Image (cartoon, rainbow, N blue to C red):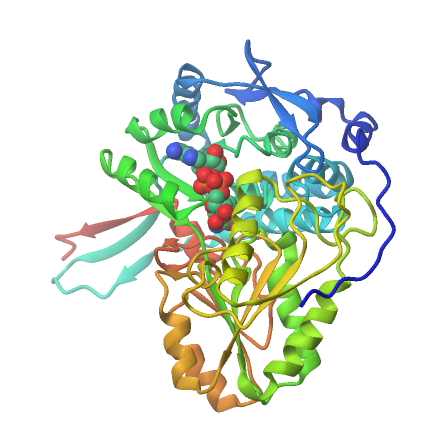
Amino acid sequence: MVFQTVRHKSPPLAGLAARHLQDLRRRDFVAGAALIDGRWIAGEQRDAVVDPATGEEIAEVARCGAADMNLAIAAAERAFAGWRELLPAKRGAILKSWASLLLDHSDELAVLVTSEQGKPLGEARYEIAYAAGFLEWFAAEGERAYGETIPSHKPASLLQVRIQPVGAAAAITPWNFPVAMITRKAGAALAAGCPIIVKPAPETPLSALAVARLAEEAGIPPGVFQVLVGNPIELSAPLLRDTRIRALSFTGSTEVGRLLLKGAAETIKKVSLELGGHAPLLIFDDVDLDKAVKGAMAAKFATSGQDCLAANRIYVQRGIYDAFVDAFAAAITQLKVGHGLEPATDIGPMTKLSVANKCMSQIDDAVRRGARASSAYQDGSLGSNFVPPTLLSDVTEDMLIAREETFGPVAAVLPFDSEEEVVARANASEMGLAGYVYTDSLRRALRLSERLEYGMVGINTASFTGPPIPFGGWKQSGLGREGSRHGLAEYMELKYVCFGDLAA
Ligand code: NAD
């Protein structure tokens, strides 16, 4: 069964991103220079940045190597003493200026994000505001890194716990939120008093380098925030090996997270990992159908599905299953696929061809095994990074899409009968990032919020992330938390101090 609406063909997309980039007032945003120790490095070798919608080259960036990374590590270590000495309020003021600069340049940054990442411009603008929010939030939270005084178990003594910055940190960031995943890590590190070196994804370096320009303008001193682009293995090796890097934060695939955790074991760094998801969305038949469909649309199709929070397995109770599938299919067919810079676009290209290919193979596998597919219209002239928004219904647990993360605009719907059964199915995954429940029963909502084995649970909402919440997963979805006071703790060490012999 294929639902398709007829639409007009898109206008030619060739040159669209390049024209937008040419119009940017801030030419330095597309210079493609890395930031090492306060210097902008154009690089002897340059790598191409590509518009994922068309495959066209839109810019070049410096290709940094291991020697550059060693310089950056030394600079971060040198910068640590001065940065940690600044009063938290002063560090906070700098973070706030950085946030304001991000917001002031929101339109230009959004063009960069859309041009290299592919997401619709409106979502890119939202990401800039979301990203700035982390800087503002941590600017204040840095002033609240209180220690403790412990009632003593020893006579004439005073027991204190202090919280101190761990040292120079490193961040390896993904391409799906190329600005916000930097500020979520850097906001916490800098507020804690730690310099941070960022290695962004090679697909989305322009956004990261523009964020670095604004960091410099905000008054972040040399060596405190550095961005190096290049081969991930070559650049991460020195970070892993060097004892001066005390903390490593990574967002990306579980496979790479596992490699980095092993690599960091040599020097026993503090490691925080935000890895893949495989989120279940449980829809019970007591809910309002419209609300459930809106929730499923938001939980599945934001960021064109390239979101670790995306609802990957949508379990729908038998009583509303058919009605839900019809209404969900109708909503999906309304989605407009196109270039993110076109105003009407809901779903852009996948940033990486490998992600698009994985989606298509999951669709093929599911259909071969008996799932029903219905897709939104997609102009045939769009390139191979595009995946038509697709509903797969009657999905069974043996299908690839039910067993592995999708990371694209493909929704898998599976029927269920009882609460007991669906909780077992939802928890039968090695991933444990986020889960969603739609139900009108308060008792059931409370029960499920306890029983789901996920780091984050949304009850009757598909939108719950933001600076004050501890973002992170259970099981193989990661270690540690980002955002919230727990996110600050990833860059801090406890120090217990015992004052003895205090008797007069
Ligand atoms: P990835 O894990 O390969 O890339 C993420 C980051 O890791 C990038 O900066 C990349 O350059 C870096 N990297 C890659 N290999 C590395 C290595 N050997 N050593 C050090 N750094 C390395 O992710 P991907 O291949 O681009 O995407 C594949 C899948 O990863 C996606 O389909 C999705 O499932 C998952 N992913 C998850 C998130 C998330 O938000 N949790 C983000 C991006 C990708």
* Residue 305 spot, x, y in % from top left: 60, 55
**In this rendering, is residue 121 above or below 200?**
below
Q: Nearer the viewer, residue 198 or 205?
A: 205
* Residue 30 spot, x, y in % from top left: 70, 24
Q: Is residue 233 left or right of residue 281?
A: left
Q: Quadrant of residue 35?
A: top right
Q: Nearer the viewer, residue 330 or 229?
A: 330
**In this rendering, is residue 219 above or below 46?**
below
On the question of residue 270 being in view, the answer is yes
* Residue 103 spot, x, y in % from top left: 72, 44
Which residue is farthest top?
A: 44
Q: Residue at x 48, y 60 (%)?
A: 401
Q: Nearer the viewer, residue 224 or 285?
A: 285
Of the 4 image quadrants, the one containing the N terminus is: bottom right
Q: Quadrant of residue 109?
A: top right
On the question of residue 172 being in view, the answer is no
Of the 4 image quadrants, the one containing the C terminus is: bottom left
**In this rendering, is residue 176 above or below 295?**
above
Q: Is residue 198 left or right of residue 383?
A: left
* Residue 166 spot, x, y in % from top left: 34, 40
Picture mark count: 0
Q: Is residue 456 left or right of residue 166?
A: right
Q: Nearer the viewer, residue 94 or 212?
A: 212
Q: Quadrant of residue 391?
A: bottom right
